Amino acid sequence: MSASTWFLGISVGLSVLSIFIAVFCGKFFEKFN
Amino acid sequence: MDMNRILIVSLFFFVLPGIVLWFTRKRAESVENYMVAGRSVGPVATALTAISAATSAGLFVGGAGMAYKFGWGGATWQLGAFFGSFFTWLVVAPRIRQVSRNLNVMTVPELFAQRYGSDKFYGFAAFWIVVFTIPMLVVQLRSGALMMEAYMKIPYTWSLVIMSLALVGFTALGGSVAISYLSTVQGLIMIGGSAVAVAVGLSLVHGIGGMDASLTQQSPSLTAFIGDVPRSLWYNLSVVYLFGFFSSPHVVARYYSMKDGNTARWSFPIAMVVAILWTVVAVLIGLFVRALGYDLKNPDMAFATFTSEIVPPFVGILLVLVLLGAIFTTLDTLLMAGGTSVVHDLIERSRGKPLEDAVKLRYSKIVMVVLGAVAFGLCLVKLPLITIINAFAFGAFIMVLGVPLLFGIFWDKMNRESALFCTTLAPVLYILWRLYLVKPTGLGEIPGTLLVIVPICIVWSILKPATREEYFTRYAEKVLGR
């Protein structure tokens, strides 16, 4: 895979993962309440 | 200077901040609102304020320059910053908010004083904050004025006067609560401007595929993962930015302002998307200029070339606003962090008794005017020492604040002595490493110093754990409820 695929893939991947965690792992953030 | 420029400068530096000050005028009358925005900021404002505080002109100008020079290799090290941001927003920022609220603290030195049970931290940590914040202010202010001179054709001294007046007037009068609102608006302008610029750039190079083909034609190393970037530099930069989002005092203070755990939850994806967007935009701008075949003597001119020669004038103006926004949002939070530390950690502690709210607010405003005036004066005299200290600031904050903060909030055993070591001797070791040990060891000063101080903190704290000390019991009662 080329560097551009890695870089943009990881960028999009981390963004999507953060959205998934926020949407589906609400219990995790309750620990910090 | 034509009317359009006068209009844009007035709108950006005076009308917009003026409207924000008007709307927040009542809320800026309490100390908690003024210093930590009343711990009531929602997810969008928290994410945009913190990310725009952490994003200076250096990302757009330097990030584009490095990508222009080395191709994708000059961009991939930024993945370290992405993972750092991910880790920070997932666990560090929510924990900082929780601890700061339970301890009812307003600054990083105060958090250390309560966690490690010693008032010495007020002096030591606040000293470093002030020492490094002023040069950071000067460098940002200077680059903002130079940019206004280059793009808006306003003479340097007048640019400096306009920026300083807007900055000091706005920050001193509005405090943290006004900063949150203005950073949100400026952040949204930055998102819009950078997205338009990338869309235009992509159409010019015929997409990522077309750009890669052009880069490979110039040199295959431009599309390699690390390419011609020196390996030690690539690894050093990757590591450095892992820690960046929880070490700088002006960024950490933004986590104190979060409303609740739910804010931490939703600011996480917003911050990630925005931080990644701005970094990708900076990188792509450098790559666009290279792919289009521009031959620049100074790689740091890539952003300026893209803005003034490649995109249509309207997009160019948007990009200038992106840069001005990046500078202003960093400047106001820096001034706030420096001013808060001077009044809350130094003046108030040296008196030995709390200041009345009205007096504290008045002192804060006076101190911010003084700090702004000092920064303005230093911009005019152009002392080389300021640039040198600024170059040390980012790494020094990792040693002085980042390490004791991270260990302090996540590892109960972290003891007072290790934290004191970080806030006193670690920056000295860091500076010595930079001067004398980078060449012989091949290790950059930040990973090198971390490899020394982190094991020292761990071993020392295992041998003499804080959990056996009285000061930790008091902290545990407040934060852990035990």
Image (spheres, rainbow, N blue to C red):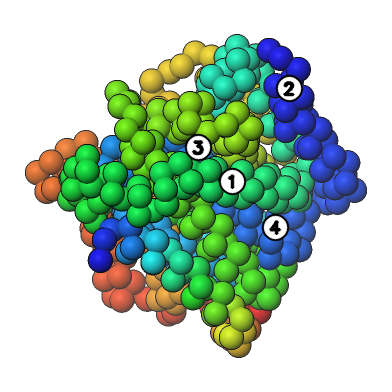
State the mark number for residue B136: none
Pair 3/1: label in front: 1
* Mark 4 lies on residue: B45
At 46% from the left edge and 66% from the top edge, which residue is drawn?
A12
Which residue is at the front of the view, B142 or B291? B291
Residue B384, given in percent of the width and then of the height, sits at 38, 20
State the mark number for residue B57: 3
Secondary structure state at the residue bearing disc 3: helix
- The reply to whether dot 3 and dot 1 touch (C-beta < 8 Å) is no
Secondary structure state at the residue bearing disc 2: helix
At 11% from the left edge and 48% from the top edge, which residue is drawn?
B441
* Mark 2 lies on residue: B4
Residue B90, given in percent of the width and then of the height, sits at 51, 72
Q: Earlier in the sequence, mark 4 or mark 2?
A: 2
Name above or below for residue B182 compared with residue A1: above
Q: Chain of mark 4?
A: B
Residue type beneath disc 3: Ala
Q: Earlier in the sequence, mark 1 or mark 2?
A: 2
* Mark 1 lies on residue: B196
Secondary structure state at the residue bearing disc 4: helix
Please give the count of numbered marks on the rendered protein. 4
Q: Earlier in the sequence, mark 1 or mark 4?
A: 4
Residue type beneath disc 2: Asn
Report how far apart the C-alphas of labels 3 and 4 lie in the structure: 20 Å
Determine whether, in the image, residue B241 is placed left or right of residue B190. Answer: left
Report how far apart the C-alphas of labels 1 and 2 lie in the structure: 20 Å
